Each structure stands twice: as C-alpha cells, then as structure tokens.
Amino acid sequence: MGLFDKKYCDICGDKIGLLGNRKLEDGNMCKDCAAQLSPWFSDRRRSTLDEIKAQLDYREANKAAVEAFRVTHVLGLDTKVMLDEDAGKLIITRSRKWQDENPDVIDFSQVTGCDYEVDESREELKREVNGRSESYNPPRYDYDYDFYVLVRVNSPWFSEIRFKVNSSRIDRQHSG
C-alpha cells in the first residue's frame, strides 16, 4: 500500500482526504467520525475499530442525556462545570452552545476525585548595560501561572478531565 493510495473510513465508509486520516490500532477513521468522539478521549491510536464504534454508540445515546440535562448551578467563566443537582449529573464544557456540542454527561457517582495543578514558568529579567544584556543584582524574574483542575472519572472512554481555570496567564514580577 503506497503513501498516496486512497483510504476509506472503516466507520462510515467515506473516502478519507489526504490529511484527514485518523489511524486506529486496526483501521482508519475520517476526521468527521473522529470529531464525534468525546473531547476528553485521548487514546484513539491504541483503540480498535470495535472500541471506537462502541464509543460512537455511547456518544449517540449521550445526546438524549444532554437534552434531558437541566442546569441548576454553573461554576467557572471560560470552561464551565454545569451541574444538574436534581439528576445528580454534570457537564464540563467551554461551548456557549453546549447543547449542540454533545458534551459528556457524567453522573456524580462517576467522579472519583479532584485535584488542582499550578503550572509555573519563570524567566529571568535582564537589563541592557553598554549594549550587553546583564542580570539585575539581586536577580529579577517574570513568573507566569496557569491553574488547572483535574477531575478523575470512572468512564470506559476516559479517566480524567483536565481543564484550565484561568482564561489567560497570570503574570508576576519578583526580585531575589
């Protein structure tokens, strides 16, 4: 099989364009079928065709759960954790039109834990003296921070949902 041989999606049967192939362990999938997978799913390349078909069936059934979802509480601004406290379910999404995006509806009982992570980067600030870059004494640094929440879930399709809480990096300068 050559590099430019035509490939067909093993899910829907459509011809796969030049840059549209998504490899599976035992087949190929088009980008349109891949777009229907859960946004939290990351193990496509090691998944079999049968596993992908089962997930697509789950995603189709999830549409009814999205339709039945009634938001009682929203946490967050950019990425939102939406709760349906009456049904004991939650959705995590960045989409304003979340009903159209088919976000995964998760039972509270599927949540096994939650943590936060802080991603810090540090860059030394320098000054120019006589045309040369020179460290301050004491050194000064520019710090950037990103804050993430990691929700662990018991799901056959993904085990964690990681999302950034802040919508832009938080900057801070510090001496010493």
Image (cartoon, rainbow, N blue to C red):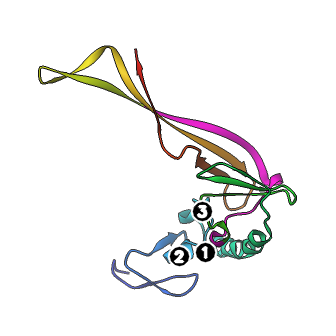
What percent of the width, then of the height, locates residue 91?
Answer: 71, 58
- Mark 3 lies on residue: 95
Give the mark nearer the N terminus: 1 vs 2: 2
Tell me residue 116's x, y (percent).
64, 38
Neighbourhood count class around disc 2 (C-alpha, 10 Å): few under 14, some 14–19, many 20 upward: some
Q: Quadrant of the N terminus?
A: bottom left
What secondary structure is marked by label 1? helix
Q: Which residue is mark 1?
A: 49
Q: Between 119 and 58, which is closer to the camera in this rendering?
A: 119
Report x, y in % for residue 80. Answer: 65, 53
Which mark is drawn over residue 122?
Answer: none
Q: Which residues are magenta?
A: 100-121
Tell me if 84 is positioned left or right of 119 in this view.
Answer: right
Inter-mark Cα distance, 3 to 2: 31 Å
Which mark identifies residue 27? 2
Q: Is residue 123 above or below residue 116?
A: above
In the image, what residue type sits under mark 3?
Ser
